[in-house]
Image (cartoon, grey):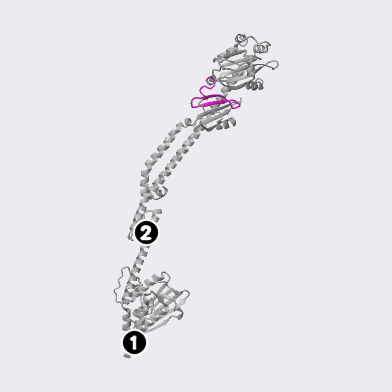
Amino acid sequence: MLRAYFNLSLKFKIIILFTLLMTVFSVALGYYAIKTSKTQVVNKVSSTNLGVVRVVDNNMRSMQKAISNWVTVFVMDPYIQSTLQMEVRPEEGTLDPALYNGSTTTLMNQMLLTGNFDYVALYGKEGPPLFQVATDDSSGSGTIQQIEANPIYKQTAALRGAPLWFPMPADNVFIQNNRKDKIGMTRIVRNTNNGYTIGFIFVGVNQETIKAQYLANLYDKDHGLVILDAGGVPLLEAGKPFYKEGQAELENIRSSIPESGSKVVRLDGESLLLTYSKGENGWQYLYAVPLSVLTEELNSIKQFVVLLIVGWLVMSIPIMLLLTSFLTAPIKNLLLSMRRFQNGQFDEKVEVKYGDEIGYLSQGYNNMVENIKSLVDDAYVLRLREQEAELKALQAQINPHFLYNMLDTIFWEAESAGQDKISEMIINLSRLFRLSLNRGKSFTSVAKERELLELYLSLQKMRFRDVLEYEIDIPPGMSEFIMLKLILQPFVENAIVHGIERKRGGGFVRVTGFQEGQRLTFIIEDDGLGMCEEELAKLTALPKENDVNVAQDTSGYAVRNVHERLKHYYKDEFELIYDSKPGQGTRVQLTIPAVLSMREE
C-alpha cells in the first residue's frame, strides 16, 4: 500500500497526506478534549461523592450513638440492674408490663416512637431472654448458653461493655426466624456497683430501616454503597450492586484505605468511579458510580468531533484540489516540457513566474536544456565536420596507388630526359601525399609532421624560386612525441598565401619548436604583409553550423578547421595565440600537451 501511495501523482499525495494529518489532528484534539473533560467530571464527581460518603459516615455514627446511648440508659436503669442481679430468674412475662409502666416507660416509648431499631433482647445469666421485642415479626431467640458458645459473645465480652456491631444472616443464634436482614449490636451488661457481668443485650436494626432513616436519597440504581466493619466484613449494601468478596481490586483498596479518596476501577468488565473513606469507628465506606453515567454528557463532544472531521473532509477536499492544482501546475508544465524535449524539441523552455523552489527548479531546467542543446549542437556540428573530412579523405584517396604509380612513371620519364629538377619536384610531391594521408590516422609523430613541412616548403620554394626563404628549427628530442597531423601546415600555407606571396621582394618563414615540461610549443612566423584586426578575426572565426565553403581560397578555411580539430581532441589543454600587425608580419604560437601516445576517437 505504501508503494501504491508513492506511485500516485504529487497532487493526490498532498491531498491524501494533508487529509490524514488533519484527521489525525482532529481526532487527537477531540480525544484530548474528551479526556480532559472526563478528568474534570471525574474530579468534580469525586468531590461530590466524597461528600456523600461523609454524610453516610455521620449518619451511621449518629445511628450507632443513638442506639448505644439508649442501650446504656436502659441497662443502667435501677429496675433493670436489680432484675439482672436477682438470684432467682423472674417468671416469664412479668418483665414486660413493668418496663412499660415503671421507670423505663419513657425509654420504651422512645424506642417505639423513634423506630431506631427493630429487635431488642435482654438476657440474664441463664435461659432465654428476660425481655424481647420485635417490630418485623422475627422470633426464635436462642438461650444465653447458646449465645455464649458463639464467637460473637467472646468478641463482645472482650470489649468489656463497649458495643460490638456485626452483620446478621437470615438465620442465626440470636434470631432463629429472622424476617429481614439486620445489623446486630451486642453488649455485655455490667453491675454498676462492682462491674461484674450480670447480663447480655442484643439489638438488631433492619437494613431497610437504616436505608430509610439514615441513607435516604444517598443512593439509587446507578450509585452503589457498601458499608464494611473494621474487619472488612460487609454490613450493608445499597443501590447498584458492585461489591463481591474476594475481588482483588477491591481487596487491595479495602486493605489500604486511607482517610478518604477516589479511584477508577474496573469490575466485571465495567469501569467505576470508586470513592472510599474510613470512619472514626473503623467502619469502611465504598461508594461507586459507573463512568458511563458520568461521561454520558461527553457524548456530545464525541459527536462534535465526528461532525468536525466529516465537515473538515467535505470542505477541505475542494480547497485542497484548488491548492494542489495551483502548486502542481508549474510542475506539470515542467514535465510536459521535458517530454517535448525528449521527443527532440531542443528549443524548449518553461516560464519562470515566481522565485520559489519550483521557480529555481524551472530556471535550472532551462539552463540544463540550454547546455544540452549546446552540447548536442557541438556534437552534431563536429559530426558533420568529421563526415566532411572523411569525404575529403575519400576524395583524396581515390585510387591512391594509381596516383603514386603515375607520379613514379613521370619521375622516371623526367630522369630519362635529364630533368633533375622536375624529378625532385615529383618525388617530393609523392612523399608529401603519402605523409598527409598517413593511412587515415588522425595523429602522427612530430618527426613526420616536420618532414611534411620540409617537403611542402621545398615545393613552395621551387614554385616561388628566390621569393621564398624558410627555416625549420624543431629539435630531434621532440621527434617521438605524438600530435595531430596537418595542424602546422595550414598555418605555414596561410603565411605564404597572405604574407609572402603578396609582398614585393619575397619573404621569410620560420617554424620553431621547443618543449617546456609537459608542453610542446610551435611557433610559425613570417615577415610578410601582416593583417589588421578585422582580417585576423575573419581568418580565425569559427564557422557557423550552416556554413558552406564555396570560396576558391581554402587557406582560411583550413586554419578554422585546425582550430575545431584542436578543440575537439585536446579540449581545453591547447593554446593558440595570433599576433599580426600590418607591415610587420604574423606570428602564430601553438601549445599542446606533450604525449607519447594518443588514442584514436
**Label 1 element class:** helix
Residue 71 sits above or below residue 223 on the image: above
Q: Mark 1 points at which residue?
A: 423
Q: Can residue 495 be seen in this view?
A: no
* Residue 42 image offset from top left, x and y in percent: 51, 32
Q: Is residue 234 magenta?
A: yes
* Residue 83 image offset from top left, x and y in percent: 66, 11
Residue positioned 41% across, 83% down in the render: 471
Residue 220 sits above or below residue 451 on the image: above
Mark 2 surroundings: few (<14), some (14-19) or many (≥20) residues within 10 A: many
Residue type highlighted by circle 2? Asn
Residue 87 sits above or below residue 562 on the image: above
Quarter of the image where one finds residue 108: top right
* Residue 583 image offset from top left, x and y in percent: 36, 80
Q: Name the residue under label 2.
A: 366
Quarter of the image where one finds residue 106: top right
**Label 2 element class:** helix
**Which range of residues does the magenta coloring cover?**
212-238
Residue positioned 37% across, 41% down in the render: 315
